[in-house]
Amino acid sequence: MEERWQEIGDRVYVRRHESFDLNVGLVVGDEGCLVVDTRMSHRQARELVTAIRTVTALPWTVVNTHAHFDHFFGNAVFLPADIWGHVRCAETAEATGEAQRRKWLHEGPEELAEVEITPPGRTFTDTATLDLGGCPVHLRYLGRGHTDNDIVVEIPGSGVIFAGDLVEEGAPPQFGDGFPAEWPDTLARLLDLPGEAVVPGHGAVVDRDFVRRQHADHVTAVEVLTTGGDPARVPFPEETVAEIVARLGDLRTAGGV
């Protein structure tokens, strides 16, 4: 996979990486730029910095779409810039960052050992607007889905929404700490936003029809698996179905549904 910037809106870019098939966003205004997610390590973040500087020399602000390691472990490389995220993104990064590091170090990426875990320092609850100079960017929390702290990044007038892992193209949606019963409603709110190009957390840029189909798949999964239907009717792989069932059970036990 060739890792290069693709301009998908006026001064709105996405860079798809071989590692985890992860997408990083870049929005360039007249006075600054916004970096959407920072990859999984300092090493990868430094590579990202080099790539950003091929597009713009403007100072950056960072936003994390959620608190999974592959989206925020590169944060420290971008300091002292403001790093934005949902308030629960900051809390989760602080509470689980070391556990995430230990888990994935066991999988092999030794570069994780050097990571200085850096949660977002600027937080919001529902919405926040950043001004990059002639280019406002809206950060929106639409509800629980892939995690309890997913946000989307909307660039008005560009036709682009960065959806983080609320939308997945490169692989099935991941439910490990997700909220299956609420995810469909969150996607419905995303579909209420303007914009034809939707950047998923992983995989190729998609359109609204793709998001509608994925929303329908989520609805079917919840309906089947909460009413005793045949799991074979769920339009996700067998291992994903098992993950949804386990998560629904965990949430019922914890009173979270």
Image (tube, rainbow, N blue to C red):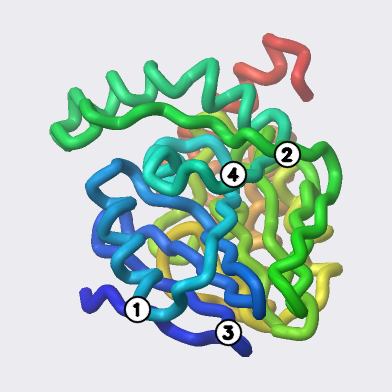
- Residue holding disc 3: 11
Label at residue 144: 2
Q: Residue at x 59, y 44 (%)?
A: 83
Q: Residue at x 43, y 60 (%)?
A: 202
- Three-letter amino acid code of the residue under disc 1: Thr
Neighbours of disc 3 within 10 Å: few (<14), some (14-19), many (20+):
some
The local secondary structure at tag 4 comes to strand
Q: Nearer the viewer, mark 4 or mark 2?
A: 4
Q: Which tag, 2 or 3, sits closer to the chain's start?
A: 3
Whole-angstrom CA distance, mark 4 to mark 1, is 21 Å
- Residue holding disc 1: 54
Give the x, y percent position of residue 128: 81, 51
Give the x, y percent position of residue 75: 44, 42
- Residue holding disc 4: 83
- Three-letter amino acid code of the residue under disc 4: Ile
- Above or below for 110 versus 81: above
